[in-house]
C-alpha cells in the first residue's frame, strides 16, 4: 500500500517547490492510515523526490533539496500580521505618539483581522507597557518629563555650523527638521538651546560663536543631534558619550557606519529615515501596483550610498531598472561647492543647475531607452531639471516622472514624490527622549515614508 501510494503521488502533476497535501488530507483522499502515508513519504524522500522543511511542510524537490530562492515564505499568523502592520503604521507616523489610537473597529478593518485578535494584541501591548488604556481608548504610554512644572527643563539641539556659529540650510528637509524641532519643543514647553558643531568637530559653539561645554547646561534633560552634513559625526557623538539623559540622533549616514559602542548605551536611540533600500522598495512596490514593471533611474549623485541604496531598493521590489547614473559626485552640495568657487554668491544656484544639466546630457547620451519609460529620479531636484530640459527641447520624455524628497517644487511641477516624513521623525525623536524605557532594545528606529501623488 505504501509503494502504491508513493507511485500515485509521483503520477500527480507537480513541479519543484510545490507543497504536498498534508498527511491528514492524504489519509482522507486515499482512505489509508497515518502510518501508511508516513511510510509512502519516506519512500519518496529516500528516492530524493521530496524534502521536508520543519514548520513549513513537505515539498517536491527533484534533487531532494529545495533551492533557497524556492523556499516557501513562512505562514504569517494573524497575531504576527497585526504586530507587523501596527509597527509599520507606527514607523510611518500614521499612529501618533500623542493622540489616541483609532477605534478598535477601524483598526480591525485596516488590518483585516477580527476584533478578538486585535483585542488580544492591544491587551498584550498594554501589559508590555507600550500602550495605556482609558475606557475604550488606547494611547501610547507617556512617561515624559514635566517641563510645564519645571520651566527650566532644557533640550540641547545640535546641528552643523561654520566656525563663527552661523548656519545655512542646504535643503528643504534640513530646514523642515529645524522648524519642526522648534515647534515641537515649544508645544511641549521645553527650553530649546541650539548649538553647533564646526567642520573640524571636537567642540560645541553657541550661535554667537562662543565655545561651550555640556557642564554649562545644568538643566538639560535630553539632547537631539543631527548628523546631516556633519563631516565628523563620531566626534559629535563622543561629546555626549558620558551624559545620563536621553539622546536622540538623526543618523543621516549609512546604517553600517553606526558606532557600535553607542548602540549599547541604554539612553541612546538612533533614527534612520533616508538611508538603506527601504525607500526604493516602497517606491517600487507602489509603482507595480500601478502596472509599471520597468523604469529608468536617473542619479548624478551615485557616489553616495543613498543613491545606490535607492536603486537597489527599486530592483529588490521586483522592478526592471535601466541605469542612468554617474558616480563623480555624492550630493547636490558638491555642485554648489564648485559654483561657490566659480561665481558670485547670487549666481551659485543657477550655475550649479547648469552643471547638473550638462551631467544629465552625458547620462542620456548612452542610449535613448529612457524616452519611452517611466523615470525615477534620485531626488526632486533632478526630476525638476529633467522636466525643464524637456520644455527646452534638449530631452524627449514620454513616460511619467517620479522622485524622492517631496519638496515644495514637486507640488508646483506635479511630480509624484516619496515623502521621507520629517514630521514623524521629529515626533519619534521627542518620544524617545520623553519615554526612553518604552522603545525597548531596538536602538535603531526606522521612519517609513510614502509616495505623495500630485
Image (spheres, rainbow, N blue to C red):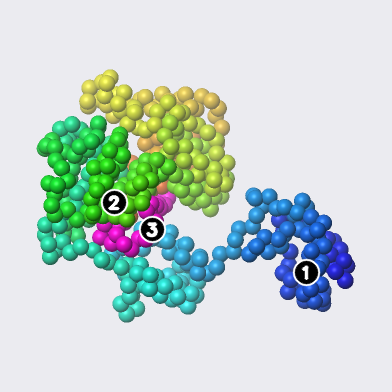
Residue visible at 56% across and 64% down? 76
Determine which residue is flagged by label 3: 441
**Quarter of the image that includes the N terminus:** bottom right
Residue visible at 76% across and 58% down? 50
Classify mark 1: helix, strand or loop: helix
- How far, Cα to Cα, is label 3 from label 1? 44 Å
Q: Position of residue 454 (x, y in %)?
A: 39, 49
Taking the view exactly as shown, the residue that stands out farthest to the top is 342
Q: Viewed as shown, does residue 369 lie left or right of 48?
A: left
As drawn, the label of residue 38 is 1
The earlier-in-sequence mark between 3 and 2 is: 2
Displayed quadrant of residue 120: bottom left
Residue 299 showing in the rendered view = yes
The earlier-in-sequence mark between 3 and 1 is: 1
* Number of numbered callouts drawn: 3
Determine which residue is flagged by label 2: 248
Residue segment shown in magenta = 427-454
Q: Position of residue 285 (x, y in %)?
A: 51, 51
The earlier-in-sequence mark between 1 and 2 is: 1
Amino acid at each position: 500500500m505504501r509503494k502504491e501510494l508513493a507511485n500515485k503521488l509521483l503520477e500527480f502533476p507537480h513541479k519543484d517547490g510545490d507543497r504536498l497535501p498534508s498527511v491528514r488530507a492524504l489519509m482522507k483522499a486515499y482512505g489509508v492510515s497515518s502510518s501508511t502515508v508516513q511510510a509512502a513519504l519516506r519512500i519518496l524522500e529516500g528516492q530524493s523526490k521530496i524534502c521536508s522543511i520543519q514548520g513549513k511542510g513537505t515539498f517536491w524537490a527533484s534533487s531532494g533539496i529545495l533551492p533557497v530562492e524556492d523556499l516557501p515564505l513562512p505562514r504569517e499568523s494573524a497575531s504576527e500580521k497585526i504586530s507587523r502592520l501596527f509597527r509599520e503604521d507606527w514607523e510611518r507616523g500614521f499612529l501618533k505618539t500623542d493622540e489616541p489610537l483609532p477605534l478598535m473597529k477601524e483598526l480591525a478593518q485596516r488590518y483585516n483581522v477580527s476584533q478578538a485578535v486585535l483585542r488580544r494584541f492591544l491587551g498584550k501591548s498594554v501589559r508590555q507597557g507600550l500602550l495605556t488604556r482609558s475606557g475604550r481608548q488606547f494611547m501610547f504610554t507617556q512617561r515624559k518629563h514635566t517641563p510645564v512644572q519645571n520651566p527650566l527643563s532644557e533640550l540641547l539641539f545640535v546641528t552643523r555650523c561654520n566656525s563663527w556659529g552661523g548656519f545655512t540650510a542646504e535643503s528643504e528637509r534640513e530646514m523642515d527638521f529645524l522648524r519642526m524641532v522648534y515647534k515641537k519643543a515649544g508645544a511641549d514647553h521645553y527650553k530649546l538651546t541650539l548649538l553647533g558643531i564646526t567642520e573640524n568637530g571636537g567642540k560645541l559653539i553657541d550661535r554667537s560663536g562662543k565655545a561651550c561645554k555640556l557642564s554649562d547646561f545644568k538643566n538639560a534633560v535630553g539632547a537631539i543631534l543631527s548628523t546631516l552634513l556633519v563631516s565628523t559625526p563620531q566626534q559629535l557623538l563622543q561629546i555626549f558619550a558620558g551624559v545620563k539623559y536621553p539622546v536622540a540622533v538623526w543618523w543621516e549616514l549609512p546604517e553600517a557606519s553606526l558606532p557600535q559602542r553607542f548602540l549599547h548605551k541604554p539612553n541612546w536611540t538612533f533614527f534612520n529615515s533616508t538611508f538603506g533600500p527601504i525607500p526604493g522598495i516602497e517606491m517600487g512596490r507602489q509603482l507595480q501596483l500601478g502596472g509599471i514593471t520597468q523604469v529608468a533611474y536617473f542619479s548624478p549623485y551615485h557616489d553616495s550610498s543613498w543613491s545606490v541604496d535607492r536603486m537597489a531598493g527599486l530592483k529588490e521590489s521586483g522592478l526592471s531598472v535601466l541605469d542612468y547614473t554617474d558616480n563623480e559626485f555624492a550630493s547636490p552640495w558638491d555642485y554648489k561647492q564648485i559654483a561657490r568657487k566659480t561665481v558670485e554668491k547670487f549666481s551659485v544656484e543657477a550655475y550649479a543647475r547648469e552643471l547638473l544639466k550638462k551631467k544629465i546630457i552625458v547620462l542620456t547620451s548612452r542610449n535613448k531607452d529612457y524616452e519611452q519609460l517611466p523615470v525615477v529620479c534620485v531626488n526632486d531636484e533632478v526630476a525638476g531639471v529633467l522636466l525643464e530640459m524637456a520644455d527646452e527641447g534638449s530631452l524627449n520624455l514620454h513616460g511619467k516622472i517620479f522622485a524622492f524628497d517631496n519638496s515644495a517644487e514637486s507640488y508646483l511641477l506635479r511630480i509624484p514624490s516619496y515623502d521621507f516624513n520629517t514630521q514623524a521623525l521629529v515626533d519619534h525623536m521627542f518620544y524617545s527622549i520623553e519615554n526612553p524605557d518604552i522603545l525597548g532594545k531596538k536602538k535603531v528606529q526606522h521612519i517609513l515614508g510614502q509616495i505623495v501623488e500630485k
